Image (cartoon, rainbow, N blue to C red):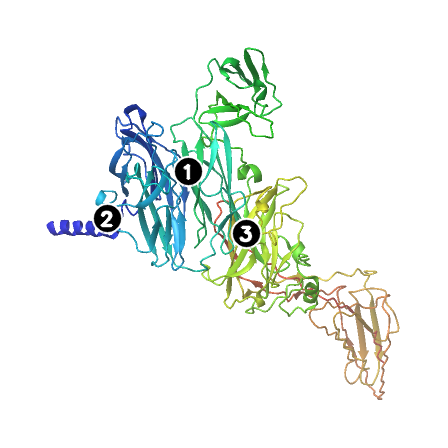
């Protein structure tokens, strides 16, 4: 038992050692603490706002707040999450702690980190107020590549306007535990800039910093006090990955993306929208990771070709959040990351309304009454609401305004279980010169209970995908040309006009044995390689304005797509081996693939495509073509895109199964009459039997040959016809005429006796040899030739084989459904050949 205990203890020790030297646990991707001193006790206690990035699944917040502590947990069902370098999420909480604070914090059972801060109370000489420690924005987990140097600028802000510096945490001062510095990471302390030299093996590394604020001083003045006003912790992680592309291929911010370290001032209940846009030339953006304040509204990622966008929105709530709120974002691809960028939301404080102000909230409007005596040096004529058309009435003592909930520029937001109607009374000066006059900004809000309000805490007016596009499915199918659900367009295809017309004409002139992308196609034999395929991208979306946009497609010979070749890139076919077929359907796309020109040598092909649906928000316009305009951020302006769908399918390149047989029946011929005719001839002779000519017609597709032997009578009857010949002879019986029609399959042969509509060609050959005899033997010989009106030959059409193993699967996209590709054989036409033979009435003598 003792040995087992020692082994168990040793295993635990090795497991802890394997986590590596971290100052806060290997499962922590980052941490910041924003500190707000409490005036109630002179700053000895502070309100600490924690933001931590931890590994997924998100650990619970239980255990952070003990009984009786001043602590608040920001619980949410929609935390900030990301997938690069591995799955992570953000946890946030606030707690009242001593200004000089050191503690080990546990999140769940697997996440542990050490925190040290020094925010002791300092009274500022220039203002007489407590010093406000520095704020540092926490970016998403950082990524870099081997041998690719890059820099990371931290976004820092100080409410007092102090100078901010950053330095590495010092373990000797108790600021971190076992946190060695890395030789490949450099720090510019004055700029708070980290530089990765690129000289590090692939792996994950942790960086522990302290951010400090210093009293600003002129550059030439010597400052005697060299100690900072405060020091707060900043924990970061850097994941170094193997390099697979150029060191300058990272995504870049474009369009209306906020500038790094920029600030946006917001009023209470004021809605602010933020658009984040990126351009990535080498790899498609897989996510725009965001870390921000609780209750920040985020839409899903929109990725179209090299462009990617995500919308954010914020409404300042009445809460205990800090006045400065950072929002950081970064674009990740499979192996690349953009430069992290952060911005600041500066929340204006809620001040006390002017004395005597009354705001009455009714069911449909709010009424404001404001005494003019409280508006010092403010002219009521300069005041207006969100909409200048809404009247404001005033006299010598009071100002009054009736503000409709559905007019006057009133905005509606959802706050928890309440509807909040907001407007603002503010000073507006219509001067072209700078003036020095006081101004008024008075936020107005009415809360209306709304128990049925759902969704996020703040309902921003951005339509969701289901609201814009409804419920729909997208899928991929692969077909032999001329087959499948869009066969009406692929049998005789028309190609996009962006393909050179001369080349299309040349391709259509190539014979069916050529590997070309024209409309002509013939199947090969079983075991031969398929030369062409149609790649069909489909959607069942019922919105008329919805259009399918194809960002990229690529093929591979392996299911894991380890090595790929592009088919469509940024909406453009990469070569003349791929041509888009024109259809009248906006929500579908078809591409003709010339497999002979593709670098495929295996027996299967795997294809993966990324598609979106798009709706133009501008009347009478269509979504722009991605090809040729992929770099312009205007594509994402004025158009609403669905999320990206990744579709995957496979197909066999070998013909493996012949098509099922097709049976064709020749049309029947209606006879002129149906009365049978019997002709009997009796002849006494001493000669050998009369010999008639034997006629053997041979038919050749697709001609009709009519052969008629000589006859003395023309019957107007059709089959069945019975001819009986009786001959009396002393030698041998009379031999009947033999008529043998010979046909070549596949044909239909019709043998008709004495049809009145048949042209007659006479071949009369009669030889009579007379030999004297005294004995006459009459031998009745009856030869009956019965031919039906129509003899139907059943032939098996030599139809073409189909390709086996046409299967499809789904990759990515929760509502994506893939359908198996189907093929049907071609119908081989059966040539009809009719041969009509008139049998000669034989008279032997």
Tag nearer the camera, 3 or 1: 1
Residue 146 horizontal/vertical position (percent): 38, 59
Disc 3 secondary structure class: loop
Single out the residue that lies furthest toward the bottom.
Answer: 772
Disc 2 secondary structure class: loop
Mark 3 = which residue?
305
In front here: 751 or 22? Answer: 22
Horizontally, is 384 left or right of 99 in the view? right
- Distance Cα–Cα, label 3 vs label 1: 30 Å
Horizontally, is 428 left or right of 728 in the view? left
Mark 1 = which residue?
326
Instruction: Please identify the quarter of the rendering in which residue 523 is found.
Output: bottom right
In front here: 58 or 178? Answer: 178
Residue 151 horizontal/vertical position (percent): 40, 51
Query: Please, is residue 840 above or below residue 811 in the view?
Result: below
Residue 375 horizontal/vertical position (percent): 51, 17
- Distance Cα–Cα, label 3 vs label 2: 45 Å
């Amino acid at each position: 038992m003792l040995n087992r205990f020692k082994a168990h203890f040793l295993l635990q020790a090795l497991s802890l050692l394997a986590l590596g030297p971290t100052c806060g646990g290997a499962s922590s991707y980052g941490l910041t603490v924003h500190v707000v001193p409490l005036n109630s006790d002179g700053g000895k206690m502070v309100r600490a706002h924690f933001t931590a990035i931890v590994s997924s699944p998100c650990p619970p917040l239980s255990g952070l707040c003990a009984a009786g502590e001043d602590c608040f947990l920001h619980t949410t069902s929609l935390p900030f999450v990301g997938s690069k370098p591995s799955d992570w999420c953000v946890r946030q909480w606030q707690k009242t702690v001593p200004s000089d604070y050191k503690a080990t914090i546990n999140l769940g059972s697997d996440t542990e980190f050490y925190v040290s801060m020094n925010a002791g109370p300092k009274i500022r000489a220039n203002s007489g107020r407590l010093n406000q420690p520095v704020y540092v924005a926490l970016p998403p987990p950082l990524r870099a590549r081997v041998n690719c140097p890059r820099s990371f600028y931290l976004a820092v802000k100080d409410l007092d306007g102090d100078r901010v510096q950053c330095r590495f945490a010092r373990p000797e001062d108790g600021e971190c535990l076992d946190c060695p510095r890395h030789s490949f990471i450099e720090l510019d302390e004055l700029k708070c800039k980290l530089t990765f030299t690129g000289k590090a093996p692939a792996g994950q590394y942790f960086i522990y910093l302290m951010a400090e604020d210093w009293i600003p001083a002129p550059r030439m003045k010597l400052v005697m006090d060299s100690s900072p006003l405060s020091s707060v912790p900043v924990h970061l992680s850097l994941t170094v990955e193997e390099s697979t592309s150029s060191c300058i291929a990272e995504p870049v911010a474009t369009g209306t993306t906020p500038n790094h370290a920029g600030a946006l001032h917001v009023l209470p209940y004021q809605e602010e929208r933020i658009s984040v846009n990126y351009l990535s030339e080498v790899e498609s953006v897989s996510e725009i990771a965001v870390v921000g304040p609780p209750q920040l509204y985020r839409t899903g990622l929109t990725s179209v070709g090299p462009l990617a966008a995500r919308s954010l929105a914020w409404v300042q709530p009445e809460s205990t959040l800090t006045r400065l709120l950072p929002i950081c974002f970064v674009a990740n691809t499979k192996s690349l990351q953009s430069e992290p960028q952060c911005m600041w939301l500066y929340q204006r404080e809620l001040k006390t309304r002017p004395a005597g102000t009354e705001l009455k909230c009714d069911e449909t409007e709010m009424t404001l009454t404001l005494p003019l005596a409280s508006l010092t040096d403010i002219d009521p004529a300069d005041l207006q609401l969100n909409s200048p058309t809404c009247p404001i009435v005033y006299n010598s003592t009071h100002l009054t305004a009736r503000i409709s909930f559905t007019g006057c520029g009133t905005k509606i937001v959802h706050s928890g279980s309440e509807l909040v109607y907001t407007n603002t009374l503010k000073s507006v000066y219509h001067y072209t010169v700078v003036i020095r006059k006081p101004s008024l900004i008075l936020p107005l809000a009415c809360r209306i209970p709304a128990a049925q309000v759902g969704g996020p805490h703040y309902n921003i007016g951005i339509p969701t995908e289901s609201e814009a596009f409804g419920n729909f499915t997208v899928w991929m199918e692969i077909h032999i040309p001329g087959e499948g659900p869009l066969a009406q367009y692929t049998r005789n295809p028309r190609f996009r006009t962006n393909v050179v017309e001369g080349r299309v004409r040349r391709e259509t002139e190539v014979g069916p044995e050529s590997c070309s992308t024209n409309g002509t196609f013939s199947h090969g034999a079983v075991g031969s390689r398929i030369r062409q395929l149609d790649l069909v991208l489909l959607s069942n979306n019922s919105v008329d304005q919805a259009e399918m946009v194809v960002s990229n497609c690529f093929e591979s010979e392996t299911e894991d797509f380890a090595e790929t070749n592009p088919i469509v890139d940024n909406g453009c076919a990469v070569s003349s081996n791929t041509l888009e077929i024109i259809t009248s359907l906006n929500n579908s796309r078809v591409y003709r693939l010339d497999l002979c020109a593709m670098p495929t040598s295996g027996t299967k092909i795997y294809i993966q495509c990324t598609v979106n649906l798009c709706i133009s928000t501008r009347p009478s316009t269509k979504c722009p073509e991605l090809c040729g305009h992929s770099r312009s951020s205007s594509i994402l302006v004025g158009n609403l895109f669905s999320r990206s769908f990744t579709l995957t399918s496979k197909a066999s390149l070998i013909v493996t199964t012949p098509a099922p047989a097709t049976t064709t029946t020749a049309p029947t011929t209606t006879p002129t009459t149906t009365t049978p005719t019997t002709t009997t001839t009796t002849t006494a002779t001493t000669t050998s039997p009369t010999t008639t000519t034997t006629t053997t017609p041979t038919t050749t597709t697709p001609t009709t040959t009519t052969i008629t032997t000589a006859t003395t009578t023309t019957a107007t009857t059709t089959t069945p016809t019975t001819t009986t010949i009786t001959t009396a002879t002393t030698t041998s019986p009379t031999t009947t005429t033999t008529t043998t029609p010979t046909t070549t399959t596949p044909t239909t042969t019709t043998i008709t006796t004495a049809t009145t509509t048949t042209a007659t060609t006479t071949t009369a050959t009669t030889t009579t040899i007379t030999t004297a005899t005294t004995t006459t033997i009459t031998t009745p010989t009856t030869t009956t030739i019965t031919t039906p009106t129509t003899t139907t030959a059943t032939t098996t059409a030599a139809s073409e084989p189909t390709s086996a193993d046409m299967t499809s699967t789904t990759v990515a996209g929760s509502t994506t459904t893939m359908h198996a590709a189907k093929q049907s054989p071609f119908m081989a036409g059966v040539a009809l050949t009719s041969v009509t033979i008139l049998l000669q009435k034989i008279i032997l003598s």
